[in-house]
Amino acid sequence: MKKWLIVAVLVAFLAIVAATVGGTAVAQATTSEQDCVTIIDQEAYDEVIPAVTHQVKVIDVEAVAGFWANFSPNDTQATFVGPATYPVDARGTWHVHTNGGPGQDKSGVFAQGNPAKGGNWFYRQQEVEEVSHMETVIDVPEQTIHHDAVTHEECNPPGEDLCPNIEGDQDASYIDDNGLVIDQEGNCVVPTPDPPVEPPVDPPASGGHKKPPVVVPNVPGDPGVVIPDTL
């Protein structure tokens, strides 16, 4: 009788150990605290706003319209001694014209004919074309605006099953930093608890009769271990 009692206690102890080991392995497939990751919705970037500008015309050489003028000396009997002075000469008057005239290839004051006669002095201004270029004036400088990344957090609530309905080979697994059981192929594993150890059963003695079986309780939810005995 003592023999069977010792066996029953040993079996109950082994069953409790097996259930505890199995329960611990399964618990490692759930979160004990919030496990959060940062999800990037939009990467950080720099937005460049172009400068606001306008063009201006810069004149390097002013344009001058071509013209010519003739000099008319005052009514004097003395011999005119040139040249006449442009644009003002007290000895006479300059008369300006826009078209025609003598010495069209000349510039400045020149004599045409006898320089001793005041009426033979002329002035010509050749046409000068405008020389210019365009320059850019900045009204608003270029701007660079930095935009930070847009993110949000995603968390698994405590106790949430991280890998439901997945089973694998517990012997080829390991525990990762998050407390998850991972097999050699990288799959999340929910280990299966070891089955309870059944005690050996001796055949009843010849001519004897059986006693009612003895049931040793196991952990909650386990049917326990049945130990037969004979009188």
Image (cartoon, grey):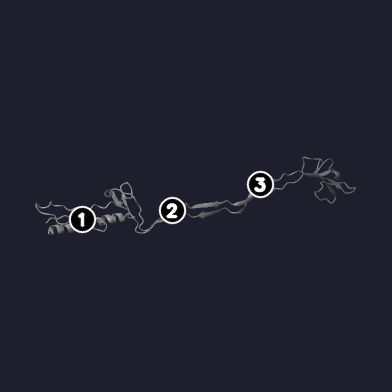
Q: Reading the chain from its start, which is encountered first: label 3 or label 2?
A: 2
Residue 39 image label: 2
Residue at the far left in the pictured view = 207
Q: What is the C-alpha distance between the residues marked 3 and 2? A: 55 Å
> Horizontal placement of 1 versus 195: left or right?
left
How would you rate the neighbour count of disc 1 (Cα within 10 Å): few for under 14, some for 14-19, many for 20 or more? some
Q: Residues within 10 Å of mark 2 (few under 14, many from 20)?
A: few
Residue at the (53%, 52%) spot, across then down:
47
102, 170: nearer the viewer: 170
Please, what is the three-letter code of the amino acid marked with disc 3?
Answer: His
Q: Secondary structure at mark 2?
A: strand
Real-space Cα separation, disc 3 to disc 1, in angstroms:
105 Å
Question: Which one is nearer the viewer's eye here, 119 or 54?
Answer: 54
Where residue 6 sits in the image (x, y, percent)?
15, 58
Which mark sits nearer the N-terminus, 3 or 1? 3
* Distance Cα–Cα, label 1 vs label 2: 51 Å
Q: Which residue is mark 1?
A: 225
Q: Is residue 140 left or right of residue 3?
A: right
The amino acid on which the numbered mark 1 sits, given as a three-letter code, is Val
